[in-house]
Image: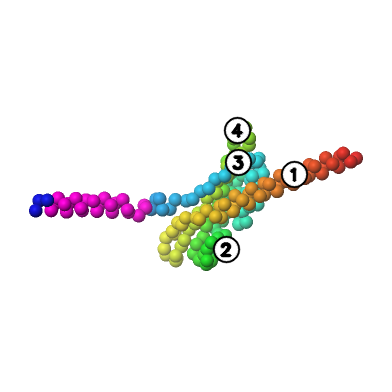
Amino acid sequence: MRLTVRAIFSLLCGLWLVACASQAPSQNTKNLKLTQQKVFYFPYDSVWRAAQLALKYPIAVNNMDHGVLETDFIRGDDGFISPTVEKVPSSGIRYKITLTLVKGKIDGRDGVRVTIQKQLEKKRDFFSEVEALNSDGLEEKVLFYRIERELIIDEGLKKAAKSSSSSESQGK
């Protein structure tokens, strides 16, 4: 009888430990906001302008001195729709995008670190609390791509203007 009680006690302790280890993630880890960063090796003013052009939404905060660019809340059905989603997001989903720009020097070159944070919220009805959602990261990647393209286009236009002005001065 004594052996059976020990065996049952050991079995219960083992089950308890397994149950604790397989518990769902806590609320704090579930609602972490996904932030993405990228460094651009261009002057701060150029990156700021490119970031403004890349955002196609109404801007609520536009503070170049602090390096913060933030959109108003965008309804889910009015904003970016991922090509991987089969249905249009509900109107209860809204989000805003915050870009943070920090200038510095990396190996003697000017660099600007751009951090993009997308804050998704879902509101089921008027009385319920807002539920924070995680982003899939696709719109953030698209924004980085747009910023990079704007910088490359701007750089190309500067080079073209410089070469045309030098060819005009040689022709005179």
The residue pinned by badge 1 equals 158
* Residue 102 vs residue 105, the one in the foreground: 105
**Is residue 91 among the parts visible in the rendering?**
no
Q: Amino acid at mark 2?
A: Asp
Would residue 131 be counted in the magenta stretch? no
Q: Amino acid at mark 1?
A: Lys
Tell me whether the residue at label 3 lies in contact with that at label 2, contact meaning CB atoms closer than 8 angstroms.
no
The residue pinned by badge 4 equals 107
Task: Find numbered disc 2 in the image and state the secondary structure of the residue it sits on.
Answer: loop
The residue pinned by badge 2 equals 78
Q: Residue at x 63, y 52 (%)?
A: 146
**In this rendering, the label closer to the viewer, 4 or 1:** 4
Tell me whether the residue at label 2 lies in contact with that at label 4, contact meaning CB atoms closer than 8 angstroms.
no
Q: Position of residue 116 (x, y in %)?
A: 55, 49
Task: Find numbered disc 3 in the image and state the secondary structure of the residue it sits on.
Answer: strand
Q: Position of residue 82 (x, y in %)?
A: 55, 60
Tell me which numbered mark, 1 or 2, is placed earlier along the sequence: 2
Considering only vertical position in the picture, is 117 above or below 123?
above
Q: CA distance from mark 3 to mark 2?
A: 30 Å
**Residue density around tag 3, few if under 14, some if 14–19, many if 20 or more, within 10 Å:** many
The residue pinned by badge 3 equals 112
**Is residue 151 among the parts visible in the rendering?**
yes
**In this rendering, the label closer to the viewer, 2 or 4:** 4
Q: Position of residue 38 (x, y in %)?
A: 57, 44
Considering only vertical position in the picture, is 97 above or below 64?
below
Would residue 18 be counted in the magenta stretch? yes
Q: Position of residue 162 (x, y in %)?
A: 78, 42
